[in-house]
């Protein structure tokens, strides 16, 4: 598990706001905002985050190694103010 990786930071029951505007396959939106509860874990070599859209059922939202290239449409930035995707 994640404990074996050396956890630097762990936050559970984090309030997450999702803002979306644009087009992705199967979805076009002029703008939507939704609230979720999530968790964020930062072990030594990656960032791992989950979001729960159904109570007690969380899905992996991000699992990205720090040394991996950022490819695709989503870019991530981790700073003192939070994780921005």
Image (cartoon, grey):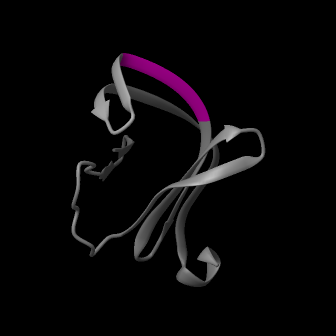
Q: Is residue 36 left or right of residue 82?
A: right
Question: Residue 23 occupies which quadrant of the picture?
Answer: top left
Q: Is residue 53 left or right of residue 28?
A: right
Q: Residue furthest right?
A: 56
Residue pictured at 60% horizontal, 44% vertical? 38
Residue pictured at 23% horizontal, 56% vertical? 72
Residue 52 included in the magenta stretch of the image: no
In the rendered image, the vertical position of residue 57 relative to residue 35, given as above or below: below
Question: Residue 45 occupies which quadrant of the picture?
Answer: bottom left
Number of labelled discs? 0
Q: In this view, does 21 lie to the left or right of 62?
A: left
Question: Residue 81 occupies which quadrant of the picture?
Answer: top left
Q: Nearer the viewer, residue 77 or 22?
A: 22
Q: Is the magenta stretch mostly helix, strand or loop?
A: strand
**Looking at the picture, how far across and down is residue 9, in whole percent?**
53, 62
Residue pictured at 40% horizontal, 26% vertical? 19
Q: Residue furthest top?
A: 30
> Which quadrant holds the C terminus?
top left
Residue 33 included in the magenta stretch of the image: yes
Residue pictured at 27% horizontal, 75% vertical? 67
> Which quadrant holds the N terminus?
bottom right
Chain part drawn in magenta: 31-36
**Looking at the picture, how far across and down is residue 41, in whole percent?**
54, 61
In the rendered image, the vertical position of residue 29 relative to residue 7, given as above or below: above
């Amino acid at each position: 598990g994640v404990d074996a990786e050396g956890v630097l930071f762990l936050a559970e029951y984090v309030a997450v706001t999702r803002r979306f505007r644009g087009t992705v396959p199967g979805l076009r939106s002029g703008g939507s905002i939704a609230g979720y509860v999530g968790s964020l874990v930062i072990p030594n070599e990656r960032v791992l985050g989950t979001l729960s859209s159904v109570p007690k059922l969380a899905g992996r939202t991000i699992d990205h190694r720090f040394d991996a290239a950022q490819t695709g449409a989503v870019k991530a930035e981790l700073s003192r103010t939070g994780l921005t995707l």
